[in-house]
Image (spheres, grey):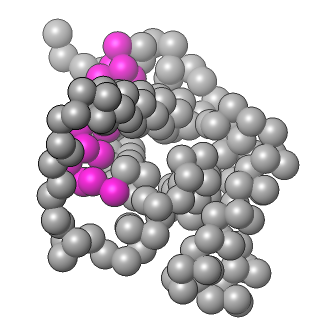
Amino acid sequence: MAAPPELVAFCEAEWPRLVGALSLHTGDRDLAEDLAQDAIAKVCQHWRRVRRLDAPEAWLHRVALNLAHSHFRRVGAGRRARVRHGVPERRVDDADDVIAIRAAVASLPERERATIVLRFYVGSSVRETAAILGCPEGTVKTLTHRAIGRLRASGLVDEEEALDG
């Protein structure tokens, strides 16, 4: 059974922004593509309902962020289990492959990172970001302010850019 043309168009339009947003959020392009595929699969699964939403793009990004959160939770649980059992952690030195902005964004706390990615990469408004994250608009503003402060402290955002955000 062929996918409806509007579903195909939606997925093709959203794929680059979704992968880009998840790459910034996770700091890992391969993981971002995997999570984006899972999120797109959920859109396909629920397309009849999703297409009627006021903002299907917001629904897609919320699903993707939830998948990323679940991934990080599983990774953290695995790390804690390895520590409890004395299994050494393997590290991959990929510092040469990571650009400064990706590293700085990835170092932000998860909610701040999600807010920055949605606001400045995806281009969501404060209201849209609040809807995606399921929090009040004031929380989005606070998270944005904190994240910009951290990025400024890391030297990636100058004073003028921070004031414009």
Q: Which one is nearer the viewer's eye here, 32 or 147?
A: 147
* Total tally of numbered discs in the picture: 0
Q: Which one is nearer the viewer's eye here, 10 or 164?
A: 164
In the rendered image, residue 106, in percent from the top left (x then y), is placed at 43, 59
Residue 29 visible? yes
Q: Is residue 34 magenta?
A: yes
Q: Is residue 136 above or below residue 96?
A: above
In the rendered image, residue 18, in percent from the top left (x then y), is placed at 38, 46
Q: Is residue 2 above or below residue 118?
A: above
Q: Is residue 97 above or below residue 154?
A: above
Residue under the point 29% across and 46% down: 32
Residue under the point 39% across and 23% down: 43
Residue 38 visible? no
Residue under the point 62% across and 89% down: 158
Is residue 24 shown left or right of residue 136? left
In the rendered image, residue 160, in percent from the top left (x then y), is placed at 70, 89
Which quadrant would residue 20 be assigned to in this image?
A: bottom left
View extreme (right): residue: 138
Which quadrant would residue 64 be assigned to in this image?
A: top left
In the rendered image, residue 93, in percent from the top left (x then y), is placed at 16, 65
Stretch in magenta: 27-45
Is residue 103 shown left or right of residue 30? right
Q: Quadrant of the N terminus?
A: top left
Q: Quadrant of the C terminus?
A: bottom right
Residue under the point 62% across and 80% down: 152
Which quadrant would residue 147 be assigned to in this image?
A: bottom right
Q: Is residue 36 magenta?
A: yes
Q: Label the magenta part by its dominant secondary structure.
A: helix
